[in-house]
Image: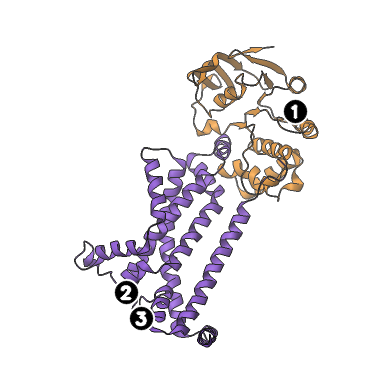
Chain colours: A purple, B orange
Amino acid sequence: MNFIIESFKQAFYLILNLDKQLLDIVVLSLKVSGIAVSIATLFGLPLGVLTGLKKFRGRSLLITLYNTFMGLPPVVVGLFLYLMLSRSGPFGFLNLLYTPTAMIIAQTILAFPIIVSLTHAATVRVNPSIKLTSFTLGATSLQTSFTIIREARYGIMVGIIAALGRVMAEVGAILIVGGNIEGYTRVMTTTIAMETDKGNFELATALGIILLAISFTINLLLFLIQKKGAIKHQWS
Amino acid sequence: MELRLNVVNIYKAYNNKEILKDCSFFFDRSAVYVLMGPNGSGKSTFLRICSLLENPDKGDINYLRENKTLNHDLNLRRKITLLLPEVGVFNTTVFNNVAYGLKIRGFKREQIQKKVQEALDFVSLTHKKNQNALTLSTGETKRMGIARAIVVEPEILFLDEPTASVDQENTEIIEHILLQLKQRLNSIIIIATHDKDSAERLGDFHLLLESGKIRKL
């Protein structure tokens, strides 16, 4: 029991003293996950909106694929990406293995289906009368699409934040393609795994507390967004 | 020269059931036309086809100005407006809902402010302008829908059951608004309703949609 209390004491000491090693790891984690989610949003949002608004051949198959890939095991993504980026792989010449870029690619692959799928669901849920009303008021197709995106904004934000939550907590894929190199590719989750193995609980606990705080903030944001988006008719 | 609407021999069927059958009518002057008929007679379908929301299976919807037929393009669409029976409400303030048609037409901020204010005054919703429109009552939502439709000053205004599902008090308010609108807008207003008393009070011309055809009463 004493060693747990001691670990927590040391962990809070590291946090309160803004330990450089700790900060570097947290900043790199936020950077990698932030960039990955931004890229996934850039491509995932239009695709989710497109499948939500347009009916085309193969749409159902595409939606099934999004939903399937939402549950992609991170280690499988890591393995797949490793094979692609290793020296003998098709993209080996890019020398990306064991770099933050490889970690960003891995997290983008994990975040992308979540953003596409939840954006699609949010777009589909928009009341059909919005589209009709927009048309009857003289909107172009593009203006109508933007109106629908605006109406689906809370659902879309939930998707982006959920994706951020998933990639921040992920360890399997980035450990395989990042390699956990100190000062270069070492992030919160990989450090926790390694330091626990080594029996150095102070840093692992400090990072665990920070990760938990980030996770709590993300969930609080999710809750607030869902609450704001859930305004219903009070009288009718 | 004013915009006119000539409906020529239109047909429309859903699931092999003919709703409109060789239906024709020429809306040739600025006035309030009240379209009556029992539920399911095709009033809403007629309005949706006239307002270019749907295409007829056969027949023509001709919008005319100075005896020239206009193309069914965005320019024409922006001269006509339909108020749907279920008013679509954007999840934003009442002000932004009413401003929507002006914003997409590229009006300047000051113009939008002025026109929306006037429209809200007209339907007595000024005090709710900063409220989220999803929190309005059904009657208030209908009034907001009317404000949103008239703020763009349409040359032809279609109103589909503007007093349906509304309590007596709001029905009277909406009728009063429509009577004032009649004086104010020099346009063609076509109202679909199944309420005979309301039709009597509002209409200059009374039309009956029966067996897929329109006849003047």
For this rendering, which residue is in front, A34 or A3?
A3
In the structure shown, which secondary structural element does the residue marked by tag 3 occupy?
loop
Crowd class of label 3 (few under 14; some 14 to 19; many from 20; radius 10 Å): few
The chain holding disc 1 is B
x and y, in percent, of residue B69 in the image: 51, 21
Crowd class of label 2 (few under 14; some 14 to 19; many from 20; radius 10 Å): some
**Which residue is labeled 2 in the image?**
A179
Marks 2 & 3 on one chain: yes
The chain holding disc 2 is A
The chain holding disc 3 is A
**Which residue is labeled 3 in the image?**
A182
Q: What distance separates the C-alpha of mark 2 from that of mark 3?
A: 9 Å
Question: Looking at the rendering, which quadrant does residue B25 occupy?
Answer: top right
The label number, if any, that marks residue B183 in the structure image: 1
From the viewer's perspective, is A213 left or right of A112? right
From the viewer's perspective, is B82 left or right of A144? right
Determine whether A94 is above or below B100 in the image. Answer: below
The residue type indicated by label 1 comes to Gln
Crowd class of label 1 (few under 14; some 14 to 19; many from 20; radius 10 Å): few
Determine whether B185 is above or below A211 in the image. Answer: above
The residue type indicated by label 3 comes to Glu
